[in-house]
Image: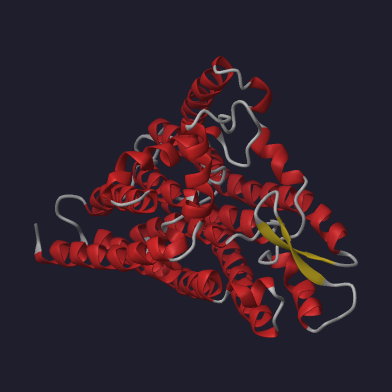
Amino acid sequence: MSRSARTLWLWFLGVHLVVGVLSVVLPTDVHTAYEPWTSSILRGGPLLGVTESWVYPQLALVPMMAAWLLAWLGSYTIGWAVMVVAVNAVAFAILLGRRPSRARSRAGATWLVLIAALGPVGLARIDTLTVPLVICALLIALRRPGVASALLTVGAWIKIWPAAAVAALWVVLRGARWRIVAAAAAVSAVVALVVVALGGAANLLGFVGAQFGRGLQVEAVAATPFMWLAALGVPGYRTGFNADIITFEVTGPGVETVAALLTPLMAIAAIAVYGLGAWGAWRHARPTRLLPPLLLSGALVLIVCNKVGSPQFLGWLIAPLVVWTLWDRHAARTGVRLGVLALAVTQVIFPYVYGLISGAHPVGAALLTVRNGALVALLAWSLIRLVRAVRSAPGHRPDLSSCPSAPARHR
């Protein structure tokens, strides 16, 4: 192991030790939701996502149950933290390789910075386990798109957002589209068959329907002006706790209308972003230049146009930024800086001063404005980079290869 690799692994241990301890001692969903849910199942209660509808896809239950295998280390929460660190370590080793190049070392360092910026929520949510899975999938996507699609689809059945990465691969890798679709369909078919066999046919897609009845969460980007109205004491605007989905929402004149418009807006925005990516693929833009901004833009559309603004959503930005840094650190530099800002402010918001948010305090509204402003700026920047990737493409020419490979210096 080289000296630089040893240094990176020491930083890996240090960052995960600090963030991991914080995720254990501070209140998180691991303790307040995952442990009670799985404890109920172990006692013979309903099987979430199967015998009753659930807010998460069915495979999310697998890591939640698996954490009990490590609970002997002290508690379920500690077991979860150790499991997450172990999964991250495997992905980190794959990212660095046996003898990490400068590009891989920079990408690894970027990942550690982003983990530290997001803090404990980056380890103590189900979304955490999709990040290393997506990173590993993207590392092999240009050489083995079918395998990458399968990994991403597994991630999507844990938390839906990796489906956006599957869509990005399908758009960019024109010569491998049938493999991408076949792999995603095969994984989904296996999951569906298992769920149906267990008697959960009626709840197979329950996690999709669970999103439609939600209100406007206080952290959502679109909630920012309403949070200021509530913070300034404007009559009719306030925040309240929705016990059914364990989240705080803002209410007041116009809020329901905005919340209702966000879902179709997200769909329209996603179609526009992936349509732009498809144009770039048709013009034969280089995958290593087209894929990163398309991945990041797709993830950001799901965040910025969402009526939910949970802090763990910011973890979705990590994989695109890490892989972009690997392939083109100069192009990714501004995006990484905006990402670090958004993640760091998110850590301040949750869990440290969340009372200022849920209580609609002006300081809380100001923090949300900075964080959400950074997300909008990052989306605008990524769209600009996507347009540049499309415009710089050589134009429509016969494609002589079925699937391009990553640059040799980055393998």
Residue shown at 44% from the left, 35% from the top: 62
Depth order, front residue of 30/112:
30
**Above or below — where is 392 with respect to 153?**
below
Residue 94 vs residue 53: left or right?
left
Q: How many marks?
A: 0
| 269 w.r.t. 121: above or below | above
Q: Residue at x 26, y 47 (%)?
A: 90
Relative horizontal placement of residue 192, taking residue 289 as reference (left or right): right
Which residue sits at x=61%, y=22%? 200
Q: Position of residue 133 (x, y in %)?
A: 39, 44
Check the image and name the residue furthest to the front: 43
Asked if residue 337 lies left or right of residue 391, the reply is left
The x and y percentages for residue 194 are 51, 19
Say whether residue 93 is visible: yes
Considering depth in this image, is 267 or 102 the residue closer to the camera?
Answer: 267
Q: Is residue 368 above or below residue 180?
A: below
* The quadrant where residue 388 appears: bottom right
The image quadrant that residue 309 belongs to is bottom right
